[in-house]
Amino acid sequence: MNKELLVGKETQEITDPKLKARLQDEEDQKLWEQYRTTHDQRIKDALIMKYASFVKYVAGRIAVNLPSNVEFDDLVSYGILGLIDAIDKYDSERNVKFKTYAKTRIRGAIFDELRILDWTPRSIRQKARKLEKAYAKLEGKLGRDAKDEEIAEYLNIDISELHKLFDETKKSLLLSLDEIFYDDDEGSSRFDFVEDEKSDNPQSKIEEAEAKKILADAISKLSDRERMVITLYYYEELTSKEIGKILGVSDSRVSQLHTKAILRLRGRLSRIKEALMQT
């Protein structure tokens, strides 16, 4: 393969991280310009190889919350299809980094395949909806966060049963923030909005800005720990283990905090949706 298609040896030997990153960006830009001009399959293959490790990273974050019978290699295979789709559709002239754009396609491709496999039993989905409705109704009535004891009493179960319910339903909440507002056919993330600087659709931008505002407001009303988990997981992209070390709690506790936060958010946002539909 042409030497220009590969990362230069000089860049690999540079130790200054800022300079290395700048030179890497310049090399990436040249690669994208070559591909946009020629659509050379060799360049496309080079791009696929270059970002294959990023697919594994995205698949790894998703795999954490999946049942053990879902193979990691399968997730990577689904993600590679999303990567190829991203390479075909990416416009390097947009003011969006490729990884930001590709992440939505990779995640979307993986989630689409998981939906086809229907790996979440219907009974678990029903339990998750039951919990979500409980949070929506009880917190709407109380005007504050509902405590575990109050949710348990509302559902007429004891605390141990509620915690078991959290554990059973956490995997059905995998899509979590990605499905709160949007459900499209493009395989893109509904939370990782990618702004197109060239977009001539102001209404779309207004709707996205409003969605972000509503979601941010709902997150701000979570308890300190739940808000921290959401921030570290979705914005800082840390793993459950890394979050646990920061908060000084176990992985299972992080998972429980995440589950309750998502249930609260879905409950609150469902109330907002209902109110908007009535106006």
Image (cartoon, helix red, strand yellow):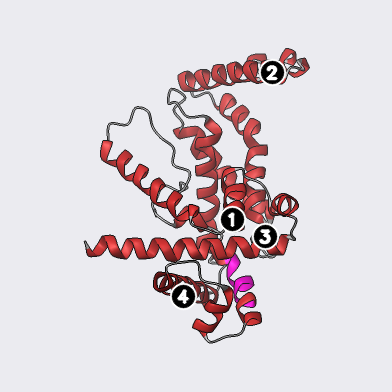
Position of residue 94 relative to residue 136, above or below, is: above
Q: CA distance from mark 1 to mark 2?
A: 38 Å
Q: Secondary structure at mark 2?
A: helix
| Residue on which the image places disc 4 | 134
| Residue on which the image places disc 1 | 224
- Name which of mark 2 and mark 3 comes first in the sequence: 2
Residue 84 makes an appearance in the image: yes
Position of residue 117 relative to residue 229, above or below, is: below
Q: Amino acid at mark 2?
A: Lys
Closer to the eye: label 4 or 1: 1
Residue in view at x 52 percent, y 29 percent: 97
Q: Amino acid at mark 4?
A: Ala
Q: Position of residue 255 (x, y in %)?
A: 65, 62
Q: Position of residue 71 (x, y in %)?
A: 68, 58
Q: CA distance from mark 3 to mark 1?
A: 13 Å
Q: CA distance from mark 4 to mark 3?
A: 21 Å
